[in-house]
Amino acid sequence: MAHFPSGFVWGAATASYQIEGAVHEGGRGVSIWDTFAHTPGRIRGGDTGDRACDHCHRFREDVALMKGLGLGAYRFSVAWPRVQPDGRGRTNDAGLSFYDRLVDELLGVDLQPWATLYHWDLPQALEDQGGWLSRDIAHRFEEYAFMVGERLSDRVTGFMTLNEPYIHFLLGYALGNHAPGRTLGLHAFPAAHHQLLGHGLAVRALREAGAHMIGIANNYAPAWPAGDRDEDLDAANRVDAMHNHLFTDPLIRGEYPALALDILQGTDPALLEVIRPGDLSVIAAPLDFLGVNYYQPDYVRADPTGPFGVSLGRIPDREYTAFGWPVVPEGLTQTLTGLKARYGETCPPLYVTESGCSAADVIDVDGRVRDDLRIRYHEAHLEAVRDAITQGAGVRGYFAWSLLDNFEWAEGYSQRFGLVHVDFATQVRTPKDSYRWFQAFLRDQT
Ligand code: GBH
């Protein structure tokens, strides 16, 4: 495979609740994911993140694994309840110290730390006060962002405010398959707006705290109509508005997409009252980069019974991951060039902040972990990134999801996304074939 531009950032990504464990240690508060995972019936197999990859105790080993792979960067998330157990007021110094040690360990071996402030593990105390449905939370997030920024901005390369506000809004507040498990349908819109408002306030707070490279990690999916009926084309436009544009137009253009406003207005005109004068200029705080998490296109059919009048289907005739998601690398090219086309000169530099797949591992008698699907997956998606660069989308980095097999939310430990296999009973880490492949690929890049 041809070479990537020099200075291209190569990394792996993880998230706090998915790997850290140590949920009762170091003064950490309870998060909505602790509550949700301990509610019977929510997570496959009754799994929880109580121990996960025990990363809090094993982070040195995990950093060494990344170094061994040849990566130059690591995207992790900070657990809000570890740093501020009640989501307001008191800082928990032991929690901040953990991230201090992690960052120093990374710098010690020349890995750039990239920190996400919020990857869905809200302090339960804030959920009890309305969570992201309540406007106050945006200010709580601002305060928390400043706290983390003050402590880490002298050493962290890139900050991301939120991870995938769309997925958090949709699965957490509209459909309920993620924490906090609310099923409000489009009446969950305040959770979208308040995340965006919190993002804008946090960008400002991080800058005041000395951060210089600030972005967000959004989930993107090109909307593909499943048929050529006009209804399906309309349905695809609605999904594009609600999934992609709703969480990006405000950041870059300072306005909500008209189609999304129509859809919300049609659901309940009162929903738009959460947007107050001045909010959009806060939300549009200048960004240094835009993080792109990509998995697959939305394959859309008109369906009056579904949210925003659509249902999502499965793209036919593809290779499928262990999750059943189709492998569609050209959707990543389309996403990256689409962002550049929509926002033009105002499009911030792009980083792929997540890309990866779940694959059933085949473990040989000698302990070798074969995951050919994952190798094909990353190979094809890297080629897709190169195509986007050739077509003029400024892409500056690629973070594989994920470093380790981990707690895959509602699927518990049943879906494995890691370049490194984790035996959850013993916590033994074993680099998979994809790890070796990536290592060879990176060696070839220099
Ligand atoms: C990311 O979310 C998360 O940031 C990360 O924490 C997580 O572990 C990782 O992805 C893997 O899941 O085929 O119709 O069911 C990704 C959000 C939502 C993207 C579901 C793919 C599939 C839709 N994903 N979507 S469907």
Image (cartoon, grey):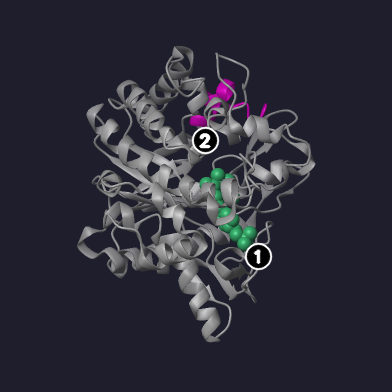
Residue in view at x 64 percent, y 43 percent: 181
The crowd level at tag 1 (other Cα within 10 Å; few <14, some 14-19, many 20+) is some
Residue in front for this viewpoint, 427 or 14: 14
Q: Say which residue label 1 marks.
A: 320
Q: Quadrant of the N terminus?
A: bottom left
Q: Name the residue nearer the viewer: 44 or 231.
A: 231
Q: Position of residue 197 (x, y in %)?
A: 36, 42
Separation of residues labelled 2 and 1 (CA atoms): 35 Å
Percent across and percent down for residue 63 are 49, 30
Residue under circle 2? Answer: 131
- Residue 439 seen in this snapshot: no
Q: Residue lying farthest bottom?
A: 229
Q: Which of label 2 and label 1 is nearer to you?
A: 2
Amino acid at dot 1? Tyr
On screen, residue 160 above or below 186? above
Name the residue type under label 2. Answer: Gly
Counting from the top left corner in percent of width and height, residue 357 is at 59, 54
Q: Which mark is residue 393?
A: none
- Which residue is situated farthest in the left direction here? 345
Q: Which residues are magenta?
A: 49-63
Magenta segment main secondary structure: helix
Specify which label sits upstream in the sequence, 2 or 1.
Answer: 2
Secondary structure category for the residue under label 1: loop
Magenta stretch contains residue 61: yes
Q: Residue at x 48, y 36 (%)?
A: 66
Where is residue 435? Give x, y as percent: 55, 46
